[in-house]
Amino acid sequence: MNIDRCVCTKRPFAELLEEAQNEGLSLIQLAQNTGASTCCTMCGPYLRRCYRTGQTAFTQLLYEDDEPYTSPQDQAPAPHKL
Ligand code: FES
């Protein structure tokens, strides 16, 4: 199993992360601008982990409790490229 994208928007996490970094988007702004994690919401924990750690592909299931939505980091611009 390889989970590497938001299925609803057809956008890979790597591409979403790059957009956040290039445009200085917070996590919330990234979700609002792209729609990722806002349709079915299944990719939310993956998108949040991607944003917070730079990991763009996952082989394990993540749930809401694994990567909660609200944190002070969600409000800040995306970190610079790793
Ligand atoms: S898979 Fe990302 S919102 Fe549905």
Image (cartoon, rainbow, N blue to C red):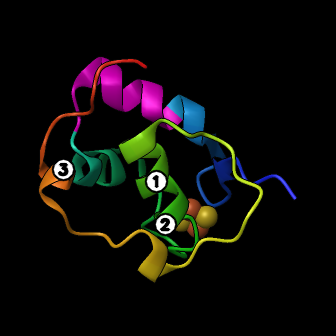
Residue of label 2 = 45
Amino acid type, label 2: Pro
Q: Quadrant of ligand 1?
A: bottom right
Q: CA distance from mark 2 to mark 3?
A: 14 Å
Which one is in front, 9 or 56?
Answer: 56
Magenta stretch encompasses residue 34: no
Which one is in front, 60 or 43?
Answer: 60
Magenta residues, start to end:
16-25
Label 3: element kind:
helix
Magenta stretch encompasses residue 20: yes
Which comes before the other along the chain, label 2 or label 3?
2
In the rendered view, would you say 76 is above or below 24?
below
Residue of label 1 = 49
Could you classify mark 2 by the number of other residues whose Cα lies within 10 Å: few (under 14), some (14-19), or many (20 or more)?
many
Q: Residue at x 63, y 40 (%)?
A: 12
The kind of secondary structure the magenta stretch mainly shows is: helix
> Does label 1 point to a residue whose CB lies under 8 Å from ligand 1?
no
Using the image, tell me which numbered label, if any, was put on residue 73: 3
Question: Would you say the residues marked 1 and 3 are in contact, meaning their CB atoms lie under 8 Å apart?
Answer: no
Amino acid type, label 1: Arg
Could you classify mark 3 by the number of other residues whose Cα lies within 10 Å: few (under 14), some (14-19), or many (20 or more)?
some
Question: Would you say the residues marked 2 and 3 are in contact, meaning their CB atoms lie under 8 Å apart?
Answer: no
Amino acid type, label 3: Gln
Question: Would you say the residues marked 1 and 2 are in contact, meaning their CB atoms lie under 8 Å apart?
Answer: yes
**Left or right of 73 on screen, residue 36:** right
